[in-house]
């Protein structure tokens, strides 16, 4: 059994492209909180900060003529949950995760939020094991192939921004967002959010993060506003 675990860990290191001097860091990065108290939540927190910094650093250098707003939208596209989950799938991180029996039965090793968190935890583990240059090399290996597709993102605006600009152009009060309900277990929360603009019916949306719910509610409100000029 131990031989199988060591082989799996070595294979995981090979896919990640970093041989850990302290393999315990990788083991912790791939341990879900449902499995043990010594899990990857703190590493995920650190990795999230490192990832955002490295993405900002790379975008700042790669796109010298883009304004702050465009760079922010580009970074959001690079570090969103869906993108990180794709990176995790490419590394087969889900196959290496240690999950509690409940998470395992419910398919946690395939859940986007779970494997995206694991990817961020791995970033932190590499940083703690070998420093920022090693973490940067790992992150850029995944981010750089996406840079060429970001030009269109630079000119795109998210629904909340577009709705705010629509209201400002017509001297209306800015949109208001209200959290109506939050439900589910900690690992699978859902958020129901309402969007209010004076003179229009409130819209509601539900998603697995408050930000996503607000964006969806803003999108529905924008469609209502633009259809009622």
Image: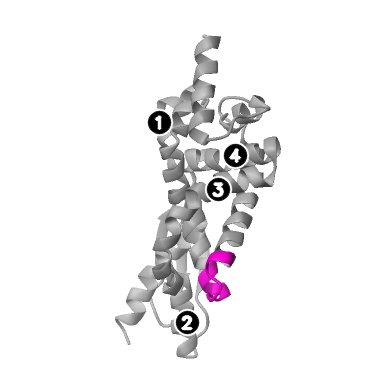
The one nearer the camera, 130 or 168, is 130
Spatial distance from mark 3 to mark 2, Cα to Cα?
A: 34 Å
Spatial distance from mark 1 to mark 4, Cα to Cα?
A: 19 Å
Viewer-side label of 1, 3? 3
Secondary structure state at the residue bearing disc 1: loop
Which residue is under mark 4?
121
Badge 3 vs badge 2, beta-carbon distance below 8 Å: no
Spatial distance from mark 1 to mark 3, Cα to Cα?
A: 26 Å
Viewer-side label of 3, 2? 3
Spatial distance from mark 4 to mark 3, Cα to Cα?
A: 12 Å
Figure check: 184 above or below 59: above
Which residue is under mark 2?
165
Viewer-side label of 4, 3? 3
User: In the rendered structure, which disc, 1 or 4, sits on the residue that comes first in sequence?
Assistant: 1
Which residue is under mark 1?
107
User: In the rendered structure, which disc, 1 or 3, sits on the residue that comes first in sequence?
Assistant: 1
Spatial distance from mark 2 to mark 4, Cα to Cα?
A: 37 Å
Q: Position of residue 71 (x, y in %)?
A: 54, 68
Task: Please tell me which residue is depicted at 33% across the width and 74% down the height of the picture.
Answer: 223
Secondary structure state at the residue bearing disc 2: helix
The one nearer the camera, 223 or 122, is 122
Magenta-highlighted residues: 61-71
Q: Position of residue 115 (x, y in %)?
A: 48, 38
Viewer-side label of 1, 4? 4
Viewer-side label of 2, 4? 4
């Amino acid at each position: 059994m131990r031989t199988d675990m060591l082989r799996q860990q070595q294979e995981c290191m090979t896919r990640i492209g970093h041989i850990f001097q302290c393999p315990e860091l990788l083991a912790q990065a791939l341990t879900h909180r449902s499995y043990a108290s010594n899990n990857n939540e703190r590493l995920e927190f650190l990795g999230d900060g490192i990832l955002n910094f490295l993405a900002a650093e790379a975008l700042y250098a790669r796109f010298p003529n883009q304004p702050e707003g465009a760079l922010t939208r580009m970074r959001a596209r690079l570090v969103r949950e869906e993108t990180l989950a794709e990176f995790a799938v490419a590394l087969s991180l889900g196959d290496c995760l240690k999950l509690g029996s409940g998470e395992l039965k419910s398919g946690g090793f395939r859940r986007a939020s779970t494997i995206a968190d694991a990817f961020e935890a791995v970033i932190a583990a590499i940083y703690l094991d070998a420093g920022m240059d090693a973490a940067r090399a790992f992150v850029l290996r995944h981010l750089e192939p996406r840079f060429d597709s970001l030009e269109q993102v630079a000119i795109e605006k998210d629904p909340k921004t577009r709705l705010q600009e629509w209201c400002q152009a017509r001297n209306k009060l800015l949109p208001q967002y209200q959290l109506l309900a939050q439900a589910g277990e900690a690992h699978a929360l859902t958020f129901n959010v309402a969007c209010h603009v004076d003179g229009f019916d409130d819209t509601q949306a539900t998603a697995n993060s408050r930000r996503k719910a607000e964006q969806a509610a803003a999108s529905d409100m924008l469609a209502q506003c633009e259809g009622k000029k």
